[in-house]
């Protein structure tokens, strides 16, 4: 069985606008979106939704609840040649145990675009979303800071469920 875990909040009281292609808020900024798992999983791929302009380097990863990087794609050129498409990166199969984690996404400029949902308010802190400035490529240990953003990028992971 394969599942996808999305990087934006699926069950909230907020009303989001439609997902659109938009520029990254700050050069080298990493956005960390929390998620929890209840059983061990093996992560096999990380993904994001490239927008209409492809000019960034992108790094996507997973961090534990203490800010320690579990795995990342490393710097990947956004210019895959196809705009407005899902970009999927194969990673080393990585088992993560039950607990709270963060999906992380960082871009090295504000020129290229990533699809995301606009929250319409300063909602991201209420979802547990945190950030780190100057975090490209993604650091070994993140220093989480408060996010005041109005946009949640669309990104996530693919995994197969392990029975251990």
Image (tube, helix red, strand yellow):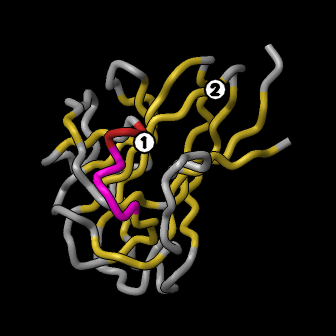
Residue depicted at x 23% and y 32%: 144
| Residue furthest out toward the top | 164
Label 2 belongs to which residue?
37
Q: How packed is label 1: few (under 14 Cα within 10 Å), some, or many (20 or more)?
A: many
Establish if 130 lies above or below 114: above
Residue 137 numbered tag: none
Establish if 81 lies above or below 77: below
Give how far across and how far down residue 48 sits, in percent. Answer: 50, 62
Drawn side of residue 16 relative to residue 126, left or right: right
Drawn side of residue 33 relative to residue 87, left or right: left
Drawn side of residue 129 relative to residue 16, left or right: left
Give how far across and how far down residue 111 sits, in percent. Answer: 23, 78
Q: CA distance from mark 2 to mark 1?
A: 13 Å
Pointers 2 and 1 in contact (C-beta within 8 Å): no
- In terms of depth relative to the viewer, which is nearer, 54 or 128? 128
Q: Please tell me whether mark 1 sits on a helix, a strand or a loop.
A: strand
């Amino acid at each position: 069985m394969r599942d996808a875990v999305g990087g934006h909040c699926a069950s909230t009281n907020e009303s989001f606008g439609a997902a659109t292609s938009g520029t990254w808020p700050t050069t080298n900024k990493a956005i960390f979106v929390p998620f929890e798992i209840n059983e061990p999983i093996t992560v096999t791929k990380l993904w994001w939704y490239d927008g209409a302009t492809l000019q960034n380097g992108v790094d996507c990863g997973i961090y534990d609840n203490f800010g320690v990087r579990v795995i990342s794609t490393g710097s990947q050129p956004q210019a895959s040649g196809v705009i407005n498409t899902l970009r999927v990166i194969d990673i080393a199969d990585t088992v993560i145990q039950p607990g709270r984690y963060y999906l992380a996404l960082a871009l090295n400029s504000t020129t290229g675009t990533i699809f995301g949902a606009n929250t319409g308010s300063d909602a991201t802190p209420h979802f547990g979303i945190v950030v780190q400035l100057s975090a490209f490529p993604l650091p070994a240990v993140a220093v989480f800071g408060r996010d005041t953003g109005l946009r949640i990028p669309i990104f996530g992971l693919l995994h197969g469920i392990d029975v251990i």
